[in-house]
Amino acid sequence: MTEPTAPRPAPVAPTRPIRYVALGDSMTEGVGDPDPARPNGVRGWADLVAEQLTAAHPDTRYANLAVRGRLLRGIVEGQLEACLALEPTLVSLYAGGNDMLRPKADVDALMEVYEQAVARLRSSGAEVVLFTAFDPGRDAPTSWTRPRQALYNEHVREIADRHGCRVLDYWRMRTLQDWRYWAVDRLHMSTAGHTYVAARMLELLGVAHTLELPPTDELPVTASPGVLKEDLYWAREYLLPWIGRRLRGTSSGDTVAARHPEWTTLLPRAVVPAGPAPRGAAGLRGSGEPVDWPEAGHA
């Protein structure tokens, strides 16, 4: 399915070193994209974005305060002050996904808390990127949340308009409707999904990148809803433990700490030497338009 297209926003033009902080829950922590060599054993789209930012702007610093299982209020209360203390120039925020999975969620009240956090981030002078919620479609185990996710998204877009934020429209990423972009737990993106989102984030910022995905038909099948054997396995290994945590009032993140609570520098595993990129490769965005983002520290 072809994804909706929209005019590309102007590239961010930093006049100082980039200090990027990622806020959120498991989606931003990187769950679903395993990497035993990294903190918490995961990588995720935010790490990939940080790596590509550093390749383009070597002065980039990165912190990731996201923790799996966090509700929106928990993200604001536990991550906002730590983020502001780091004096970031760029912040991404995805919060509220876990709230949408609760039987009762007052979306309007939650988004009042959300907007207060966004206002504080913007008043600090940071560029802020917000996420809409993902459309789970009709086949996902979370399909019943679609109406509240849609309401959440309208709030996100209005808040972004009021406070001058960029929006990464997760809802409209129809490519991700394919289950090959999701992990076996059917709730978190797979490595391919995280890579796809990282590429879209970099394009939103107007940053050249070297991220590549194989054709969808070459991706491994990681989830197959509707196959009885797999549905039973998923229910036993993922659904029942999730229900158990809800009944006990516990979270998968109770014993997990933020992966990068202080500034760090991440580089791609294979760094391409500086120089002009060939057409259709790292130096050009999907539209073929050269990226115009001055080096950090220059106007």
Image (cartoon, rainbow, N blue to C red):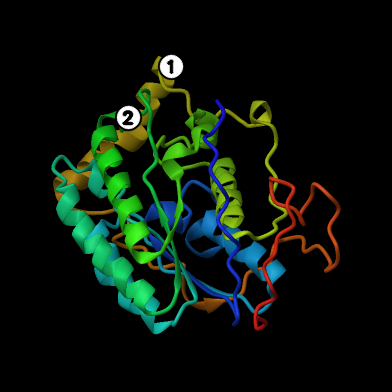
Q: Residue at x 19, y 43 (%)?
A: 102
Question: Could you say where residue 21 lies in the image, as x and y percent from the top left?
Answer: 47, 70
Q: Is residue 24 above or below residue 184?
A: below
* Discs 2/1, front: 2
Say if mark 2 contacts mark 1, CB within 8 Å.
no
Q: Which residue is mark 1?
A: 227
Q: Is residue 51 visible?
A: yes
Which mark is drawn over residue 70?
Answer: none
Q: Amino acid at mark 1?
A: Val
Badge 2: how crowded within 10 Å, few (<14), some, or many (20+)?
Answer: few
Q: Quadrant of residue 83?
A: bottom left
Q: What's the CA distance linking mark 2 and mark 1?
A: 14 Å
SS under mark 1: loop
Residue 206 lies left or right of residue 250; in this view the side is: right
Front residue of 181/284: it is 284
Question: Could you say where residue 80 lies in the image, as x and y percent from the top left?
Answer: 32, 73
Question: Could you say where residue 30 lies in the image, as x and y percent from the top left?
Answer: 48, 54
Q: Which residue is mark 2?
A: 141
Q: Quadrant of the C terminus?
A: bottom right
Front residue of 174/235: it is 174
Q: Residue at x 15, y 55 (%)?
A: 109
Question: Could you say where residue 58 lies in the image, as x and y percent from the top left?
Answer: 69, 76
Q: Is residue 255 above or below residue 45?
A: below
Q: Is residue 243 above or below residue 114?
A: above
Q: Is residue 43 visible?
A: no
SS under mark 2: loop
